[in-house]
């Protein structure tokens, strides 16, 4: 197993309840970055502590991220601070998650009625 991990073949991906780590404001983010800056912007975005997932994409936007923040105020500070400073950033769209209906872990609809 350790050899697989060392070679990058095996990795662990965890799902957690955001309220347990005081990260209750989840947001989906789509960004358009000038192609010459996409690699640098993607690497910078991936290094932000608010980002739990980042990927280059195709279509109307070319960068996607899952963001977790402590509050709406912290989300605003992130969007207008570190995110706004990404190289080559041309446009962003963000969508705060109102309610999660399914995660990789516990499905809230599988719980027994109280």
Image: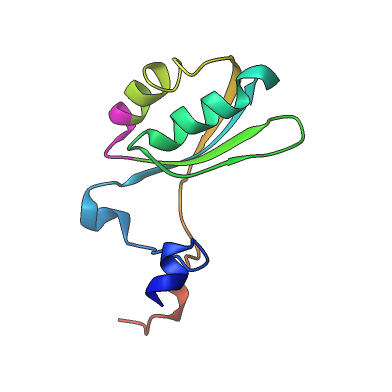
Left or right relative to 14: residue 66: right
Point out residue 109 in the picture as x, y percentages from the top left corner.
46, 75
Q: Position of residue 93 (x, y in %)?
A: 58, 27
Q: Position of residue 61 (x, y in %)?
A: 69, 30
The residue nearer to you, when weighing 9 against 26, is: 9
Identify the residue at image location x=58%, y=28%: 39
Q: Quadrant of residue 79?
A: top left
Way the structure is coloured? rainbow
Magenta stretch: includes residue 45? no
Residue 84 on image: x %, y %: 46, 16
Q: Is residue 59 left or right of residue 112?
A: right
**Residue lying farthest right?**
59
* Residue at screen point 29% across, 27% down: 73
For the N terminus, give its image quadrant.
bottom left
Q: Is residue 18 left or right of residue 12?
A: left
Q: Nearer the viewer, residue 11 or 71?
A: 11
Q: Is residue 12 visible?
A: no
Magenta residues span 69-74
- Work out whether 33 lies above or below 59: above
As drawn, which residue projects farthest toward the bottom? 112
On screen, 59 above or below 107?
above
Residue in the image at 38% along x and 21% along y:
82
Which quadrant, please, contains the C terminus? bottom left
- Measured along the vertical axis of the image, is residue 107 above or below residue 51? below
Q: Is residue 61 left or right of residue 2?
A: right
Please say whether residue 72 is one of the residues in the magenta stretch.
yes
């Amino acid at each position: 197993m350790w050899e697989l991990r060392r070679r990058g073949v095996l990795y662990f991906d965890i799902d957690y309840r955001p309220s347990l780590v005081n990260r209750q404001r989840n947001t989906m983010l789509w960004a358009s970055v000038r192609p010459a800056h996409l690699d640098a912007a993607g690497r910078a975005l991936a290094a932000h502590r608010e980002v739990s997932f980042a990927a280059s994409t195709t279509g109307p936007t070319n960068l996607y991220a899952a963001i977790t923040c402590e509050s709406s105020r912290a989300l605003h500070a992130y969007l207008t601070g570190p995110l706004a400073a990404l190289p080559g950033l041309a446009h962003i769209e963000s969508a705060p998650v109102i309610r999660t209906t399914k995660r990789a872990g516990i499905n809230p609809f599988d719980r027994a009625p109280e």
